[in-house]
Amino acid sequence: MKLSFVISTQPTKFQAITFDPNFEANAAHLASLGYDGIELGVREPDKLDVANLRRTLAQHHLSVPAIGTGQVFLEEQLSFTDPDAAVRERALARVKAHIALATHFDAIVIIGLIRGQTFPTVAREQAYAWMVDALQDVARTARAQNIRLAIEPINRYETDWVNDVAGAHALIDAIGADNVGILFDTFHANIEEPNIEASLRACGARLFHIHLADSNRWYPGAGHTNFASILATLRAMDYAGWVSAEILPKPDMKHAAAETIRTMKPLLSQSADR
Ligand code: LER
Ligand code: MN
């Protein structure tokens, strides 16, 4: 298992993510702390200087395990369930741009808030059907480029469906594509799942990616989530993916990144020794 840290490539309202205009300095710092990669939160893939980004990451031997899309909903309100067909189309086109970006890094594309939620003026079944149709289209586009998608269950205070692993399985069954799996975020799971370890096991082979945050969304070690037990569960499942710290930059990003390493590295090296 490898460790990454989530960084936004643009300013964003999403608080559990760091944006610092000096990406190069952040990359150098995270690499010096011992991170293996940077997960990118991206609103506008077409505005990124990919060549420059790749150069900086290569310089510091960092990978990009995953690319987040949630800002497209948070900043621009684009989603697959909007009552306006033109908005749904723009959401679809944007996620396809994320897929094209992901091919440069062999990264997973995360499907969180962009998938949409219910709207008062649209029947719930209709909104769900639009979401499934869009994700089938996105999954086909991703498959043609060898890219995997990860559905992220998100807690009830941020969205009104697909809040847990059971909801993610139901959505993936409806999509019917094997390049679609689950992103398990320990912060959301602490709110929604009856038992974090059992819910991890319930992901089975669909477990594609992990977001790490403690119960209070601070760095691992700042709350009451049992990361030793989570890592032991992942080892027992032979999970070979990444764990990515998506945390509030508190008390500041550098402190949060260093504390994450302090808690997680000993647990991760146990998994390498197995
Ligand atoms: C994104 O990864 C996430 O966890 C959500 O809380 C975004 O709103
Ligand atoms: Mn997350």
Image (cartoon, grey):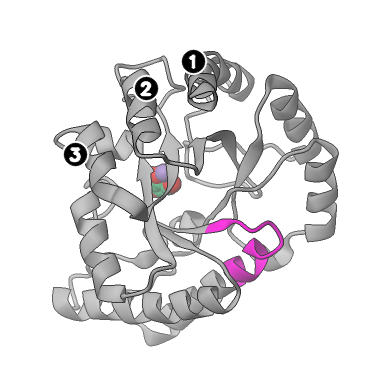
Q: Which residue is mark 3?
A: 193
Circles 2, 1 touching at the beta carbon (< 8 Å)? yes
Q: How many marks?
A: 3
Mark 3, Cα crowd under 10 Å, few <14 / some 14-19 / many 20+, is some
- Magenta stretch, residue numbers: 97-108
Q: Quadrant of residue 106?
A: bottom right
- Label 3 C-beta lies within 8 Å of the nearest ligand 2 atom: no
Mark 2–mark 1 distance (CA, rounded to whole Å) = 8 Å
Q: Earlier in the sequence, mark 2 or mark 1?
A: 2
Q: Quadrant of residue 3?
A: top right
Q: Position of residue 258 (x, y in %)?
A: 60, 17
| Residue drawn at (21%, 57%) of the image | 167
Mark 2, Cα crowd under 10 Å, few <14 / some 14-19 / many 20+, is some
| Type of amino acid at the residue the image marks with label 3 | Glu
Q: Which residue is mark 2?
A: 227
- Of badges 2 and 3, nearer the viewer stands 2
Mark 2–mark 3 distance (CA, rounded to whole Å) = 15 Å
Q: Which residue is mark 1?
A: 263
